[in-house]
Every structure is written in C-alpha cells, then in structure tokens.
Image (spheres, rainbow, N blue to C red):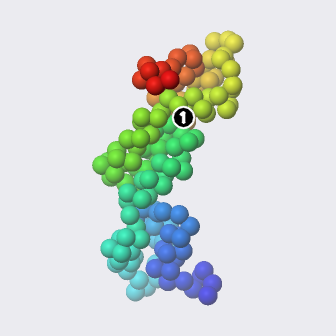
Amino acid sequence: MGFATLSLKGRALRLLAQREHSRLELERKLAGHVAEGDDLAAVLDELEARDFINPERVAQSVAYRRGSKLGTARVVQEMRSKGLDDDTVRAATQELRATEWPRAHAIWRQRFGAPADSPQDKLKQMRFLASRGFSGEIVRKVVAGQVPEDIADQG
C-alpha cells in the first residue's frame, strides 16, 4: 500500500510513528490530504482519545531533542509553534530553566573553547548564544566566565 493511498488515519499514524506530533502539527500536515467525506477533526479526536496524540509527550520530546542545543526561550518558542498550551510548556521547560547555564556553557565551550580576546569576539560569542535562545543574564555570565552561585556551591 503506497503512501498516496493511505487514509488520513493511516497518514497520521505513520507521522506519529516517526516522532511525537501535536494536534496542530498533524492538522497542518494532513490538511492537504483531506478527501471528500473525510473528517480530519474526528480522526484527530479519536487519536487523542486513544492517547496517540499527547501534548505532554510532545513537550517532553521537544525539550529532550532540542534542549541540548538551544536555550529555554527557543525551546519554548518551538513548543508554542506546535500549539502546546502554556501550562504544558511551563511544566516541560522547568528542568531546562534549571540547567540553562550548564547547557549554555557546554555549547559555548564546544563552539569557542576559550574566552574572547577582543570586544568584537566577545560580542560574537554573545550574539551566538543569544541566537540559540539563552537569556541575556546567562549569556553574559558564560562569556564572562562567571559560574552562577547556585552551581558554584555544588562543586
């Protein structure tokens, strides 16, 4: 059975088998495949009722996949673009917020490895981390080589 002959439900299940998708993502991806007599909303309702579509799993998946490369702000933006509500996003990003500095530092170390030699290099490093979605405070601390007090206390 080719992909062209799959039902809406079949297409949705194939997409869900690849990775977690939110209802909004599936709606967007399947909208072009709705044939006469198809009821996309009913298909998505059924998948949601059977827990194939689960917003918490989608949020956790995004946090896990993207958290090692992006700051919390960018991860939140990605989750919201998938149509996830604020409570789900807040719950999924709680741990990301707590690990913001170590993640930013690891990305900075991998990309640059050493403190900036010039003000221009410092700005370049700051822009890089900011573009990844890290907060201004975290960016300044990482580029300045400062370890936040709560992390310094642990070591």
Residue 138 in percent (x, y) is at 48, 25
Farthest-out residue, front: 155
Q: Quadrant of the N terminus?
A: bottom right
Q: Nearer the viewer, residue 76 or 92?
A: 92
Residue at the spot 55% in from the left edge and 22% down from the top edge: 142
Q: Quadrant of residue 36?
A: bottom left
Q: Nearer the viewer, residue 72 or 102?
A: 102
Q: Quadrant of residue 119?
A: top right
Q: Quadrant of residue 27?
A: bottom left
Specify whether 152 is left or right of 143: left
Q: Secondary structure at mark 1?
A: helix
Residue 137 in percent (x, y) is at 45, 22
Q: Nearer the viewer, residue 98 or 89?
A: 98
Whether residue 110 is visible: yes
Farthest-out residue, left: 87
- In the rendered view, would you say 98 is above or below 38? above
Q: Nearer the viewer, residue 107 or 79?
A: 107
- In the rendered view, would you say 5 is above or below 87? below
- In the rendered view, would you say 50 is above or below 155? below
Residue 150 in percent (x, y) is at 42, 23
Residue 4 in percent (x, y) is at 59, 82
Whether residue 133 is visible: no
Residue at the spot 53% in from the left edge and 31% down from the top edge: 102
Amino acid type, callout 1 = Arg
- In the rendered view, would you say 59 is above or below 96? below
Which residue is label 1 attached to?
103
Residue at the spot 62% in from the left edge and 24% down from the top edge: 125
Residue at the spot 37% in from the left edge and 54% down from the top edge: 84
